[in-house]
């Protein structure tokens, strides 16, 4: 697992109150992130690990209590949006599936995720949304 994903798990784990009920959740989250890092849609050249590394600086805004995204978060989100815009369909689907799986499996505030383009001053058709249909991107 890339170091930044391990760091993401560790920092999120210790920022939340630990209880016996959520420890299995973190185990599942770790397994999910390990599997996602190696999943690449057929004919796609965009590993999910690359997408997640661009979103890593957004952790404070999307998963914790930060009121606004950092400059590094905006830069990473803009990079993903540009890559999505400049890519062929298989790569767009790969990026979309990565963001969709993150929205499903991570405690991301979807309202904040929807505000990223406005707050970071970019336009995109990709969303961090568990209900997005990635075959239509």
Image (cartoon, grey):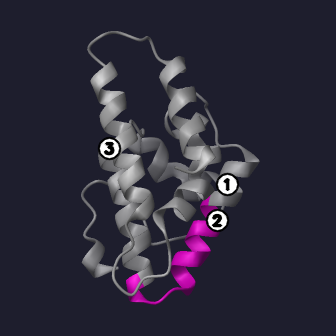
Task: Tell which of 17 and 132 is nearer to you.
Answer: 17
According to the image, label 2 marks what residue? 78
Determine the residue located farthest toward the front in the rendered image. Answer: 1
Tell me which residue sits at (47%, 63%) in the image: 48
Quadrant assignment for the C terminus: bottom left
Which element is circle 3 on?
A: helix
Crowding around mark 2 (Cα neighbors within 10 Å: few <14, some 14 to 19, many 20+) is many
Check contact, mark 2 vs mark 1: CB within 8 A: yes
Give the CA distance from mark 2 to mark 1.
6 Å
Check contact, mark 3 vs mark 2: CB within 8 A: no
Task: Tell which of 38 and 47 is nearer to you.
Answer: 38
According to the image, label 3 marks what residue? 105
Instruction: In the rendered view, tell whether residue 39 sits above or below residue 61.
Output: below
Instruction: In the rendered view, tell whether residue 55 sits above or below residue 31.
Output: below
Magenta: main secondary structure equals helix
Q: Earlier in the sequence, mark 3 or mark 2?
A: 2
Q: Is residue 6 left or right of residue 93?
A: right
Q: Position of residue 25 (x, y in %)?
A: 30, 28
Task: Tell which of 91 and 40 is nearer to you.
Answer: 40
According to the image, label 1 marks what residue? 74
Instruction: In the rendered view, tell whether residue 2 sits above or below residue 6.
Output: below
Tell me which residue sits at (46%, 90%) in the image: 88
Is residue 45 at all visible to an observer of this figure? yes
Which element is circle 2 on?
A: helix
Q: Magenta region: which residues?
A: 77-90
Which element is circle 1 on?
A: helix
């Amino acid at each position: 697992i890339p170091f930044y994903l391990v760091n993401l798990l560790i920092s999120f784990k210790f920022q939340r109150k630990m209880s016996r009920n959520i420890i299995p959740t973190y185990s599942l989250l770790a397994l999910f992130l390990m599997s996602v890092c190696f999943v690449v849609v057929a004919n796609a050249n965009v590993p999910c690990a690359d997408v997640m590394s661009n979103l890593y600086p957004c952790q404070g805004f999307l998963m914790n209590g930060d009121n606004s995204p950092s400059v590094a978060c905006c830069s990473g989100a803009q990079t993903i949006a540009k890559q999505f815009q400049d890519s062929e369909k298989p790569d767009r689907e790969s990026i979309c599936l990565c963001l969709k799986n993150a929205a499903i499996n991570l405690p991301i505030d979807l309202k904040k995720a929807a505000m990223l383009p406005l707050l970071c001053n970019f336009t995109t058709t990709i969303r961090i949304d568990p209900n997005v249909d990635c075959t239509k991107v």
